[in-house]
């Protein structure tokens, strides 16, 4: 996928859920080789649950040249995003930021995070949160460049998995 066409960030249509699932799985597939099998299994299940979540979740996609190039989920405040592993927070949380492997390095991830920031501000949120892990080094660099800071009081560690680290951006 080239970076030639204009990038359009928009709400995903209901008929694109399968495309978003496939794009997200492709974007995260590299971690199967990086994470331990137990960690990957837990992450894979969390990814599946996140993609199936309902209840106010905004599904946002980036499209270029008529093809999906990235996606992200934006959860409303106070939702149990992680199945009881950490307490719900008073701010929205972005999850499962995904960029198609062939579209990386074109500013798509940044555009999707910035859209989450815009939406959170528009709704009067005072912060935007997210969780990641050490395996996701490129994502961590992006979040830190965009001003997210560690919020270790919201970290959690599922059994047999990597530490899931929390970040927060004050708005």
Image: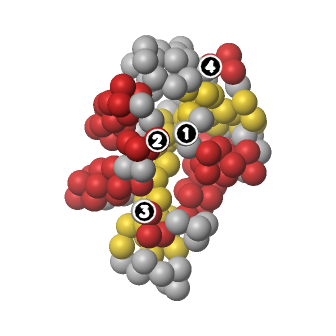
Q: Whole-Å distance between the Cαs marked 3 and 1?
A: 18 Å
Question: Which label lies toward us, 2 or 1?
Answer: 2
Local SS, label 3? loop
Q: Are marks 2 and 1 in contact (CB under 8 Å)?
A: yes
Q: Are marks 2 and 4 in contact (CB under 8 Å)?
A: no
- Counting from the top left corner in percent of width and height, residue 67 is at 36, 73
Give the vertical position of 88 relative to 33 (above or below).
Answer: above
Q: Earlier in the sequence, mark 4 or mark 1?
A: 1
What is the quadrant of residue 91 in the picture?
top right
Local SS, label 4? helix
Identify residue for label 1: 135
Identify residue for label 2: 34
Local SS, label 1? loop
Q: Whole-Å distance between the Cαs marked 2 and 1?
A: 7 Å
Q: Whole-Å distance between the Cαs marked 4 and 1?
A: 18 Å
Q: Earlier in the sequence, mark 4 or mark 3?
A: 3
Give the vertical position of 171 relative to 159 (above or below).
Answer: below
Q: Nearer the viewer, residue 50 or 136?
A: 136
Q: Which mark is residue 154?
A: 4
Residue 146 visible in this rendered orientation of the protein: yes
Q: Nearer the viewer, residue 122 or 130?
A: 130
Q: Quadrant of the N terminus?
A: bottom left
Q: Which mark is residue 100?
A: 3
Local SS, label 2? helix
Q: Residue at x 46, y 23 (%)?
A: 161
Question: Which label lies toward us, 3 or 2?
Answer: 2
């Amino acid at each position: 996928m080239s970076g030639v066409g204009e990038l359009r960030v928009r709400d995903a249509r209901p008929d694109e859920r399968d495309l978003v699932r496939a794009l997200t799985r492709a974007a995260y597939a590299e971690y199967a080789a990086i994470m331990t099998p137990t960690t990957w299994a837990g992450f894979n299940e969390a990814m599946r649950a996140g993609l199936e979540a309902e209840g106010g979740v905004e599904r946002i996609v980036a499209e270029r040249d008529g093809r999906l190039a990235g996606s992200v989920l934006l959860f409303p405040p106070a939702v149990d995003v992680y199945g009881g592993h950490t307490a719900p927070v008073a701010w929205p949380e972005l999850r499962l930021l995904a960029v198609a492997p062939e579209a990386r390095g074109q500013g798509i991830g940044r555009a999707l995070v910035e859209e989450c920031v815009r939406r959170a501000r528009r709704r009067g949120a005072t912060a935007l949160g997210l969780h990641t892990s050490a395996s996701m080094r490129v994502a961590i660099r992006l979040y830190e460049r965009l001003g997210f800071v560690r919020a270790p009081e919201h970290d959690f560690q599922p059994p047999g998995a990597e530490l899931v680290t929390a970040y927060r951006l004050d708005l």
